Amino acid sequence: MDKLKAALTSLIAGIAVTALKITAWLQSFSVAVLADAVHSAVDLLAVAITYLAVKTSVKPPDEEHPYGHYKAETLGGIGGSLAVMASATFIAYEAFTRLVRWEPYTPSLAGVVTMAIAIAVDFNRVVVLRKFRGVSRALEADALHFSTDLASSSAILALLIFGVISEKYAPEVFTRWSPAIDIALATAITIYFIKLSLALLKSSIIELLDYAPPDVVIKTRQLVQRVAGVQAVKTVKVRKAGGVYHADVTIAVDENLTVKEAHEIADQVEKTLKEELGGDIAVHVEPHKPSQRPEETPSAASRSPQEPSGPPSRSPR
Ligand SMILES: [Zn+2]
Ligand SMILES: [Zn+2]
């Protein structure tokens, strides 16, 4: 099975699981089952958002978007985060209503069977996705995600089984405890959703603010320093855009080089960084006097004082 087929299988399994869980909810009216069904629906929505975002982000740069469309992925992250937050609000509302009314859910053997089938389908999906460990990071991440989801679904299955058994053999235990466990499970899913949503929102906002990860800055500087002909690296500015990094670097080369020679060095820097970072690379060239020691700027992102404050010019192609 190839990656695309596995992703498609996972998508179909996700639709089936969501439909089964909605059925289980209609059979049991358990707010925990409802929360789990919403969770599966949100996971499906996340697949759709990711698909659209990635599809947009890989579009090549055009006249209106000279830096490419990479940040579509970041916007997708914000959209996904808001969708998760909306789901959390919905489940919290349902759980609160249940808390006020203190109603037990309906014990239903059919509900148990439906939920068990949903878990079996989900388990198979994890088995398929696990085969891509080390092959596809996205599928590997999905395998991990859905295997943790299996844990919460199993807890809810246990709740439904508890309902069927206790109602038959100890009805007073059922009426006393079932609303509490039901609401507690739904609340746990709500908390998980809120945490997930905030984490996603945080990472997206950091990216929109042109965050420069220190390790990437250091790596970029080292790569530029290693290019033959580069006598000093004056500034290194990187920023994350979706799956790539854009970079602006200022290098110093021997002041006696011809424009042609200096350009070749700048081109080599651009090529090296493009391979590593994937984004838009701008190289600014400054003259370096042979008597000078190779200089180091104290901070990776700061400009040296003699640097004009205008935008760095792109090296001519
Ligand atoms: Zn465009
Ligand atoms: Zn999930």
Image (spheres, rainbow, N blue to C red):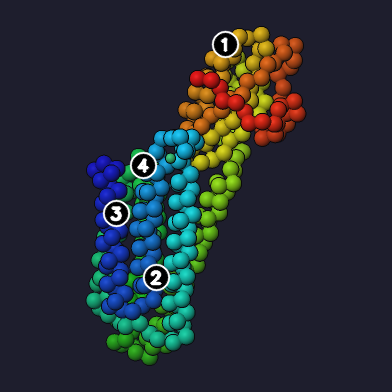
> What residue occupies the far front of the structure in this picture?
63
Marks 2 and 4, how far apart at CA: 30 Å
Corner quadrant of residue 258: top right
- Point out the tag, 2 or 3, that comes first from the N-terminus: 3
Residue ID at (25%, 70%): 114
Whether residue 7 can be seen here: yes
Mark 2 lies on residue: 35
Nearer the observer: mark 2 or 1; the answer is: 1
Disc 1 residue: CB within 8 Å of ligand 1: no
Q: Nearer the viewer, residue 193 or 85?
A: 85
Residue ID at (61%, 34%): 237
Relative to 296, 157 lies left or right: left
The image position of residue 223, as x and y in percent, is 56, 25
Mark 3 lies on residue: 11
Mark 4 lies on residue: 136
Marks 4 and 1, how far apart at CA: 42 Å
| Amino acid found under the numbered disc labelled 2 | Ala
Q: Secondary structure at mark 3?
A: helix
| Amino acid found under the numbered disc labelled 3 | Leu
Mark 1 lies on residue: 261
Mark 4 crowd level (few <14, some 14–19, many ≥20, 10 Å Cα): some
- Point out the tag, 4 or 1, that comes first from the N-terminus: 4
Would you place residue 249 above or below residue 268 in this image?
below
- Point out the tag, 3 or 4, that comes first from the N-terminus: 3
Residue ID at (38%, 91%): 172
Q: Nearer the viewer, residue 289 or 39?
A: 289
Nearer the observer: mark 1 or 3; the answer is: 1
